[in-house]
Amino acid sequence: MQGVGFRPLVYRLATALGLSGGVRNDSTGLVVEVEGPVALIERFREALRQETPPAAVVSGHLDEWVPTEGTAGFEIWPSDAAGRRTTLLLPDLATCAACSAEIFDPKDRRYRYPFTNCTQCGPRFSIVLSIPYDRAATTMRQFAMCAPCAAEYADPSDRRFHAQPTACPACGPQLALWDPTGTCLADRDKALRRAADTVRRGEILALKGLGGFQLVVDARHDDAVRRLRRAKAREEKPFALMAPDLDWVRSAARVSVVEERLLCSPQAPIVLVERREDGGDVAPSVAPGNPNLGVMLPYTPLHHLLLADLSFPVIATSGNRADEPICTDEREALERLRGLADVFLVHDRPIARPIDDSVTRVILGGEQVLRRARGYAPLPIALPTPAAPILAVGAHLKSAVALTLDAHAFVSAHVGDLETVEAAEAHQRACEDLPRLYACVPVATACDAHPDYASTHIAMRLGRPTIAVQHHHAHVAACMAENGVRERVLGVAWDGTGYGTDGTIWGGEFLLAEPASFERFAHLRAFPLPGGDAAVREPRRAALGLLHALWGEALWQQADLAPVRAVEQRERRVWASMLAAGVNCPATSSVGRVFDAVASLAGLRQVTRFEGQTAMELEFALAGIDTDDQYPFGIAKSGEMAPWVIDWAPLIGSFIEDVRRQVPVGFLSARFHNTLVEMIVAVAQRAGQERVALTGGCFQNRYLTERAVSRLEAEGFRPLWHRLVPPNDGGIALGQAVVASARWQEG
């Protein structure tokens, strides 16, 4: 792992022991040659094992004895860029305590300098242009070090010894504050102080951060938050907060030890925490109707200084409009964020690639990454066996890119939904960037089997053989890879939408899966989805599809049910005709759509404002409910070779009875969730497969995941779940790469 101070550590250890030789970075990692008495060499090897830099990740090592050369002294040799690039690149790391102390010390030469860093923190993946990781191969190459910085860089006893992004106010990047026309209003520290004044006034600040622009407003100022929502066309989806410090987070939310550790980690992700009823001074529009807050702490010196000047929480959300990629260039930001931001706080350090903030939550006592970006990308997933070099382009939503290379799968930062031309262009750049960075020519491109995904079209244009991977097989393969498993598993792949091998919309799948192949062992009973994709935004459509499968046209006589009441008379005739004729009513087995239908029947919501909103609200309704009650369901086969079919009809019938008896929504939700878990157990018992992989967007639900793991373990199974790769479509690229590589190697 390069960029963590390994060479300085080696230098200090070798010289302290009087050993001669040298150390260098190359395209595979770190190469060390030490010469001296065998006893001292053994002490060196042991010290190296014991004193690995805190941010380092060692994936393997090889020792080899070679003839002595009689060298004198120990040196840091120039990097060697030749050969195959397999070294691990470090993600961007949050500001360390030592650098934070410097920027707040008036006596320090880096006082209030917003680009302070060292070997233990600062930009890495967002600035690197090629491997090996040296200053000349980063966007810092345009900044020549001043004499004091150069002295630190060359001093083995200094923590900035060979810190590639190191800089100071005299020689490094600088801030500027622009108005919306690009006119400079202030520079350096005055720019930062005036930017803070802008936020205090309730205005919107566009801030060029580590991996792209953020939009910053006072999180206490409801009018400012509402204005930001209107400008971004983001009606109800929660905004992430940046808190001034950990004490504020504790006052606003109930924070566990694990959550605190995540917040303060070098990754410094957004962490979903349970908000206090009376805690914090957060505007209602920040996360309307949501019992959680997405909170992060300042992770760059620029953020530390801004939040220290403000002393209150701010919204720090992606600098983009709906469905567009985040802006990384200041001139581009003036165009794309026109009318959205009041002022622009920019700097002159180029960003090599866009990197958004990562999102995590705690499940089963550990972290689960929901959006994998800053702090995590491009750390690889170690594969059980070497893989063919495959580029995987991911899914259509929450897209990312992956590259298999030897025994690693490198996963890009989160790209996002490919709903716009700009997003598709950003995705294509990511497809080109990852192989270029590792000087790898993939033998094939893996894509989703859905023919209309933008990512599939991009794969077709890359000019190499394409391997289509079924969506849910990719989900299961990603979970297997993350858990280091190659043997067959029962994969429970539950999400909203995936193109099935039979042309229907899958999403409630149980697959007996291996890396190269799968068998559909079981699935939820399919039902019609009136309006197709429109049902994703209207839970009432999913509910009416279920009701039509239950009762046919008699559903329209159930006027007491919320989804029936939610359809106006003029719409009713159209929808009734659609359902009766089966026109624009694709069949689906999706658990995600069943979540929508249940929320609609419970009267929670008939139209959503963002993806997954109904499932989130059903999960929120569980607060304070403790019951093992469940609903009945059916499970049967239509033939010896046919998959098992789980019939939701008894569940929905009993659920409707409870709704009519006015059972509280919390109990409705608990019984529904418990029933889903018992479906998993019932299928696992029939499959007889010890390992059960839980994957897909539905397993972002903490209650569902934790109860499923508990019940499976109680029945003697070994459940697998996601931790460092998202269970949602952000993990699809990894699964595609694993499946395609296995198929390629099998011919």
Image (cartoon, rainbow, N blue to C red):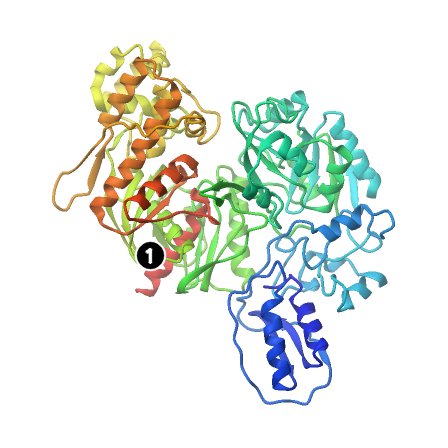
For the C terminus, which image quadrant? Answer: bottom left
Q: Is residue 146 visible?
A: no
449 is higher (above) or lower (below) than 144: above
Can residue 383 be seen at all in this image of the molecule? yes
Badge 1: few (under 14), some or many (20 or more) residues near its Cα, within 10 Å? many
Q: What is the quadrant of residue 225 in the picture?
A: top right
**Does residue 460 sit above or below 24 in this rendering?**
above
Closer to the camera in the image, 343 or 611: 611
Could you say which is closer to the camera, residue 9 or residue 134?
Answer: 9
Q: Position of residue 369 (x, y in %)?
A: 50, 45
Q: Amino acid at mark 1?
A: Pro
Q: Which residue is mark 1?
A: 515
**Quick check: 675 left or right of 110?**
left
Task: Tell me which residue sits at (75%, 27%) in the image.
Answer: 200
Find residue 680 and report its image quarter. Answer: top left
Residue 52: image x %, image y %?
A: 61, 65
Quadrant including the N terminus: bottom right
Would you identify the image quadrant in which residue 496 lies?
top left
Along the viewing direction, whichever of 650 and 198 lies nearer the viewer: 650
Residue 492 position in % (x across, y down): 32, 44
Above or below 392: residue 9: below
**Residue 233, percent from left and from top:** 56, 27
Q: Residue at x 81, y 36 (%)?
A: 193
In the displayed orientation, state which residue is furthest to the left: 640
**Number of dots carrying numbers:** 1
